[in-house]
Image: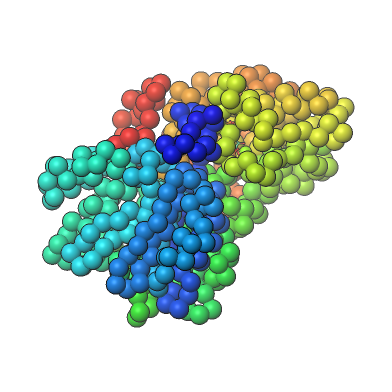
């Protein structure tokens, strides 16, 4: 099993072999009089499913900013003494899973940089597609040798370049630097950042990833990747950060500046898998959307069967919907070990089999002699379903029909989800029948793209669905798609 550089176990069985992982989680709070770092810690706990490689909190006491971050889960990084040292009025926090730049301490967030007036601490969810262009601009401004990854080998993320760029404007405030830099970024970015006095939040014009604003009863402002994190800290949901909006929060309250024209292309995959079911995106509860997808799936791909079971965790709401839509009873046929993380299962041969077996175990008394419909949210490489089907058969299931609440994943994502390269996905070049055979299912059905979109209640033109249809809404000019679909080529390193 792989070890972290400090010798502790990673959450991955094989770090070279990624399944679908999650986008990072960002959090921010402007709360004089509140225990801001503790609230940020709770917020990050609620966002742990979006990134499990490193976690960090930056706090300002209005005189200076202190950052505490490390590799690992929120619970591994922070303890009581650490939180007690992080006193102040403003905080930002991050849970990372890497998309550009290696998974090392130097790339953990919040990043910290010196500005003309003080410091900048920054957290980023998303992925920038024009890092080459931004790096060239940065080299022009601060000199080639000072570009983060040239100065320090382990500072190689897109976020480090952004942080260096924002702090390179010595003739203007951080707010004015942001207004200058943000329109130059392409790709996906939801940001929380701060200097000693002010909390900022920004969202790309496509608003690919979610970012919500909430408020505590005391009047403190909170910003988080998902509304579930607002719930957990006791904040009420106020509104989403708008596409192309920069939000500035200080002693005077909240102000808003538009840095680009909105052109919404919200990530469809957030609805399918990424976001928590208790989160609201575009006014819809993710759980309800997933149940609806399951109902539509039952209509699109009906089957004669005795029992519908979910593939926990993310497949559960769609399975509830499939049962409701089909009239087939719903039951629990697989038990999930709650202590195995979401991205723990990183499929690769023997390790993969061990990982899936560690996470999921069938209930033979429930599935024996039955025709089972097993519902999951996605098939990426097909490893989970291959294992699940085999497990259910070994436990005595008579038939196993697989139903998936997303269309086949055909293309990589460049906006903050670390999908496998195209060569590693199971779907490209395979018919549904061939995939069913590969995973050993009696039948296989994926929801149609139109059915999935219908369940979100968002207009198709306002959604990114590139991993399903290959139509990339932003930054396509920056990507060498042919090169990126070759075996071994990834977007990981700048
Ligand atoms: O086809 P594959 O390559 O196996 O990938 C697809 C599986 O990975 C995800 O589960 P994951 O274990 O990451 O998270 P979950 O517990 O939230 O379902 C997803 O929900 C599918 O079950
Ligand atoms: N998944 C993410 O949102 C990653 C953020 C950023 N691109 C990084 O690699 O650190
Ligand atoms: S490519 Fe897929 S995962 Fe990536 S932003 Fe678009 S819909 Fe989301
Ligand atoms: Mg799953």
Task: Pick whichever, 319 or 63, lies toward us.
Answer: 63
- Residue placed at 52% from the left, 37% from the top? 9
Q: Is residue 409 visible?
A: no
Q: Determine whether, in the image, residue 318 is placed left or right of residue 381.
A: right
Task: Pick whichever, 217 or 150, lies toward us.
Answer: 150
Q: Determine whether, in the image, residue 135 is placed left or right of residue 98.
A: left
- Residue placed at 62% from the left, 30% from the top? 355
Q: Determine whether, in the image, residue 168 is placed left or right of residue 490.
A: left
- Residue placed at 14% from the left, 42% from the top? 145
- Residue placed at 78% from the left, 41% from the top? 332
Q: Determine whether, in the image, residue 359 is placed left or right of residue 207.
A: right
Q: Is residue 387 visible?
A: yes
Colouring rule applied to residues? rainbow
Which quarter is ligand 1 in? top right
Whole-percent x, y for residue 393 in the image: 78, 24
Whole-percent x, y for residue 458 in the image: 52, 53
Whole-percent x, y for residue 118 in the image: 23, 66
Q: Quadrant of residue 375?
A: top right
Q: Quadrant of residue 182?
A: bottom left
Picture mark count = 0
Is residue 76 depicted above or below 132 in this figure?
below
Task: Pick whichever, 305 or 8, lies toward us.
Answer: 8
Considering the image in quadrants, where does the C terminus appear? top left
Considering the image in quadrants, where does the N terminus appear? top right
Is residue 133 depicted above or below 275 in this figure?
above
Whole-percent x, y for residue 398 in the image: 83, 24
């Amino acid at each position: 099993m792989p070890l972290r550089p400090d010798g502790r176990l990673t959450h991955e069985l094989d770090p070279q072999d990624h399944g679908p992982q999650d986008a990072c989680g960002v959090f921010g709070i402007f709360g004089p009089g509140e225990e801001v770092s503790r609230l940020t810690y709770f917020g990050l706990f609620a966002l742990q499913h979006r990134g499990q490689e490193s976690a960090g909190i930056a706090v300002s006491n209005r005189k200076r900013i202190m950052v505490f971050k490390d590799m690992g889960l929120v619970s591994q990084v922070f303890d009581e003494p650490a939180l007690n040292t992080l006193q102040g009025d403003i905080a930002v926090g991050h849970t990372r899973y890497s998309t550009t730049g290696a998974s090392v301490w130097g790339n953990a967030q919040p990043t910290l940089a010196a500005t003309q007036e003080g410091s900048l601490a920054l957290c980023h969810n998303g992925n920038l597609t024009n890092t080459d262009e931004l790096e060239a601009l940065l080299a022009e401004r601060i000199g080639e040798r000072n570009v983060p990854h040239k100065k320090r080998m382990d500072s190689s993320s897109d976020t480090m370049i952004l942080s260096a760029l924002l702090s390179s404007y010595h003739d203007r405030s951080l707010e004015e630097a942001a207004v200058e830099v943000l329109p130059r970024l392409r790709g996906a970015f939801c940001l929380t950042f701060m200097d000693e006095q002010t909390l900022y939040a920004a969202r790309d014009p496509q608003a690919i990833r979610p970012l919500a604003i909430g408020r505590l009863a005391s009047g403190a402002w909170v910003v988080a990747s998902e509304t579930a994190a607002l719930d957990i800290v006791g904040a009420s949901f106020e509104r989403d950060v708008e596409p192309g909006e920069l939000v500035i929060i200080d002693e005077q309250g909240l102000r808003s500046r538009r840095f680009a024209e909105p052109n919404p292309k919200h990530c469809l995959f957030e609805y399918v898998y990424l976001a928590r079911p208790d989160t609201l995106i575009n006014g819809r509860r993710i759980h309800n959307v997933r149940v609806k997808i399951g109902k539509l799936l039952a209509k699109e791909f009906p089957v004669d069967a005795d029992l519908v079971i979910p593939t926990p965790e993310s497949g559960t709401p769609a399975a509830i919907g499939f049962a409701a839509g089909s009239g087939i009873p719903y039951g629990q046929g697989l038990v999930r070990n709650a202590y195995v993380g979401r991205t723990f299962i990183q499929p690769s041969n023997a390790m993969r089999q061990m990982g899936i077996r560690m996470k999921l175990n069938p209930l033979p008394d429930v599935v024996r002699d039955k025709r089972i419909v097993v519902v999951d949210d996605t098939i990426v490489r097909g490893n989970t379903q291959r294992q699940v089907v085999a497990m259910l058969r070994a436990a005595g299931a008579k038939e196993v029909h697989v139903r998936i609440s997303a269309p086949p994943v055909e293309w990589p994502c460049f906006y903050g989800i670390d999908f496998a390269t195209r060569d590693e996905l199971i779907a490209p070049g395979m018919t549904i029948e061939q995939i069913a055979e590969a995973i050993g299912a009696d039948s296989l059905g994926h929801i149609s793209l139109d059915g999935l979109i219908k369940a979100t209640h968002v207009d198709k033109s306002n959604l990114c669905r590139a991993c399903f249809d290959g139509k990339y809404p932003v930054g396509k000019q920056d990507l060498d798609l042919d090169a990126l679909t070759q075996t071994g080529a990834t977007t990981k390193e700048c």
